[in-house]
Structures are given as C-alpha cells and as structure tokens.
Amino acid sequence: EAQVTQNPRYLITVTGKKLTVTCSQNMNHEYMSWYRQDPGLGLRQIYYSMNVEVTDKGDVPEGYKVSRKEKRNFPLILESPSPNQTSLYFCASRKTSGGRNEQFFGPGTRLTVL
Amino acid sequence: GQSLEQPSEVTAVEGAIVQINCTYQTSGFYGLSWYQQHDGGAPTFLSYNALDGLEETGRFSSFLSRSDSYGYLLLQELQMKDSASYFCAVRSYPSSGAGSYQLTFGKGTKLSVIP
C-alpha cells in the first residue's frame, strides 16, 4: 500500500529536550516536505527536499532541522524544543513534476512541548 | 509572495449544494488543487485544475478562472460525512525557472453539514 508513515503519532516532551520525528514514504517520490498546522493558520511549510541531500527552508523553518540521506526518509529534528512548537505536524511527499499535483500526507504527529 | 483567501467557515444542509471559493495572488501560477481534511486526520487530495473550466469527480466539482485568479469547490448532494475542512492550494513555479513547483495552502474552510 502506497503510504507516508510518521512516528511517533503523539509526543509530550519538555522544553530543551532534543527530539526527532521520523517520516518515510514507499512511493519513490523525489519531493518530501514538513508542515505544521495550527488553528486558524492552515498548513505552513517548515522545510522541503527535492531529492537526496537537497533541502531548503519553507515558510517557518526557525527552530527545526531536517536531513535527507535516503530517498524514502525525511526526519524532522527539533534540537531544543520550545512551547511555541506545540503543534500538529505533517510529513508529505509527491512527484517533482507532472501528474495531478497530488501530495500524499502522513497521519500526523501531535507534539506538545511543556 | 503567495496569498490565498477562502472563507473560514461554511454551514450547509444535508442534501444541498455548497460552493467554497478561493482567490489567490501568486507569481508563476500553474494550477489550483483542493484537499479535504477530517478532524484528526490528514489532508487528502480531491481535485486539480490547471486550465480554466470545470472538473467533475462524482459529487465534487472544481472550477478555475485564471484571468480572475479565482477558483471554487462545489459539493453536491451534501452528506454528513462531508463535514470537514477544505483547503485550496496553489501550484506555482519559482520565478527563476529552476527547481520543482511549490504548493502553498490556504487557511482552510470548515464545512459543517447539518441535518
């Protein structure tokens, strides 16, 4: 089954404790990205990657890091989480060109930073 | 930069028709997509318009007017399960011409279907 998986699905942590949210896709997509979703603000892009070892900032990259060492994986790293990073996070993947513009989303990770 | 405007909330009666509008301002516009998201779930793709006109997929249709920078999602024969948030998303290319297209999402419209 074609899918994007994220782990963990739920996480409660404390300020300053480094964490990583993993993301993996099995569709051989070149493009992967991370979004955060907050009430009234919609989906805001954090970072994206057009292929292995190619990453770039989205609209709200402060406080986050990413890496793309393999095509299927795109982890999101919070080196020193703060309460304003409490949010719902989605990983997504798609082709880089052509197609119906369909982006596939993971199930989401609900993060709470105390 | 990119900006998209859509209503924050819409309420409609089961069995009725509802239209959710989206206006956008962007450079390098290529097309407009719609995504559906149920509470607690992930966004899922509904439709995509690259050319002017209406695209129909079952009870859902999507329209685009490139000259007016405007599109809408039309939901017919509303069902309770259609209660969800709906996002329009603009597909655009960098002005440099290099790299992949970007997807920029609107803030979403929460649709409530009532009996």
Image (cartoon, coloured by chain):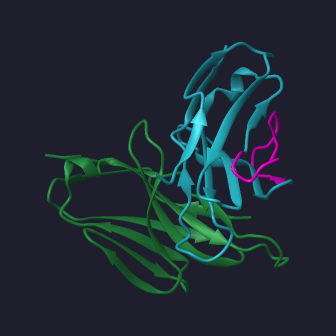
Chain colours: A cyan, B green
The residue at 64%/44% (across/down) is A24
Q: Along the line of sight, which residue is nearer the eye, A27 or B94?
A: A27
Q: In the shown orientation, is residue A84 left or right of residue B106?
A: right
**Residue B107 as seen in the image, left or right of residue B103:** left
Residue A102: x and y, percent? 53, 65
At x 66% / y 74%, what residue is drawn? Answer: A97
Position of A98 relative to A112 (above/below): below
Does the magenta portion include B75? no
Q: Please tell me whether residue A66 belongs to the stretch shown in magenta.
A: yes
**Rendered position, B54 above or below B112:** below
Give the quarter of the image for residue A94: bottom right
Look at the image and give the residue range highlighted in magenta.
A54-73
Left or right for A85, reference B86: right
- Measured as percent of width and height from the top left, residue A70 is found at 77, 49
Q: Looking at the image, which is closer to me, B3 or B58?
A: B58
Residue B19, position in %: x, y? 33, 66
The part of the image, by quadrant, that contains residue B59 is: bottom left
